[in-house]
Amino acid sequence: MTKTNVPTVLLVSFVVLSATLANVLVLSASDTPTVTIFSSGKMQQQIPVVNAVVHKALLCWGGVPSEDVGFAAQFDWIYMSSETYQLIPSIRLMNPNILIIGYVESESPTSGSSPYNNFTVSFPETCYFHDVNGNRLHFADGTPFMNISDPTWQGICASSAAWLVANGCDGVMVDDVWANFYTGIYGLNADPAPSASWWNSYDTGAKYTRWQTAMRTLLTAVQVAVGKKVVCYNGSQGGSTVYPDVCGAANLEDFAFTGATDTLNWINTLETLSVTGKYVIAEPHNQAADTEANYLYGLCCYMLGMNGPNTYYCFKSYWASSKGFYSSDFNRNFGRPLGSKVQVAASVWTREFENCTVTADFQSQTGQIVMR
């Protein structure tokens, strides 16, 4: 097996890519309106600048047939696995403003659609995660769990990211970065299953300091490798606010469909991160059935929290066998928000826009958009 030479990655401060899409509306501070929210008696002094239309994002895994290039091109932001990079020129021809983001796994070289398939790599033993007895840890499918703190593994991730941007991507999404990701690991065959005692031997403390330090180093290495391109980290609830200072974008996986309290936390996270102007993608992914009702609810939750010019909504994944649900609501002009979200019942929140009123009930997981 030929071993790929992994370049040494110097950790330096990075420059976050900023891009202005054609449909981004710019509003000066002096033009920012104010409005009294009578239902709550609160005065909204500063209204965030957001887009009048929803920015559409799409996950494209497993390859996109050439006849579906037009479908992918109607989105503003797409995640693509390495199998489909050959289609990038065709997609850009149809949509020059699209942002195409490649996929990097932080914890595995082979699970899913991984760009590491473009490399012939021999992994030294230090690249693998081990339990206290020195045994490798695996996912349920037998895939080895990689040691995110190992410099060689970090270099392989960085090299993979560099390959993706060299082949046409505008950046990369680094998957599975949240601090408690170890809960997704399961022992297989002779490998001992991870346990609380195993994890505590690796990283004690509620904030998972060792994990976060290692992941920040990995993400910084990836950012250095891609230069001024976008690095997006994929975080679930609890890990989504950890790395925005070392990345230019955040993907909020499992957004809005994980319970009433969790949904409000997700919306607040979207609100907090997007006000910085960085890219933030609200992405329910596999949490909801591919139906119009679920699409509408997720969209309403997104609109309650969208709070900056670079927010995107990504309802479902595109798999080669099915395009999933696509709604014309994506393309409606909702107008700028006239204030922040307002609570009107125990689990019901609403928000006024120039051209509509948006309401979401977190308990029943239903949403409504009433156009004016």
Image (cartoon, grey):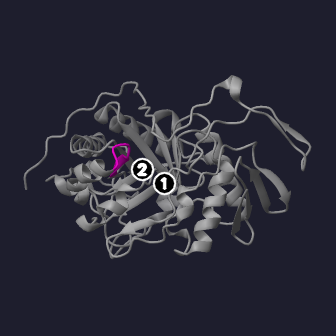
Q: Where is 237 relative to 354, above or below?
A: below
Q: What residue lies at 66% left-to-right and 43% top-to-bottom?
A: 336
In front of the other: 266 or 63: 63
Provide residue 281's location: percent of width, then percent of height: 51, 50
Residue extending farthest to the left is 2
Q: Which residue is mark 1?
A: 56
Observer able to see residue 135? no
In front of the other: 2 or 370: 370
Residue 325 counted in the magenta span:
no
For the residue marked with disc 1, what is the amino acid? Answer: Lys
Q: Which residue is mark 2?
A: 77
Q: Which mark is residue 104?
A: none
SS at circle 2: strand
Magenta region: which residues? 95-103
Residue 98 counted in the magenta span:
yes
**Label 1 Cα crowd, 10 Å radius (few <14 / some 14-19 / many 20+):** some
Observer able to see residue 86? yes
- Sooner in the amino-acid sequence: mark 2 or mark 1: 1
Cβ atoms under marks 2 and 1 closer than 8 Å: yes
Direction from residue 331 to residue 62 in the image, left or right: left
In front of the other: 131 or 214: 214
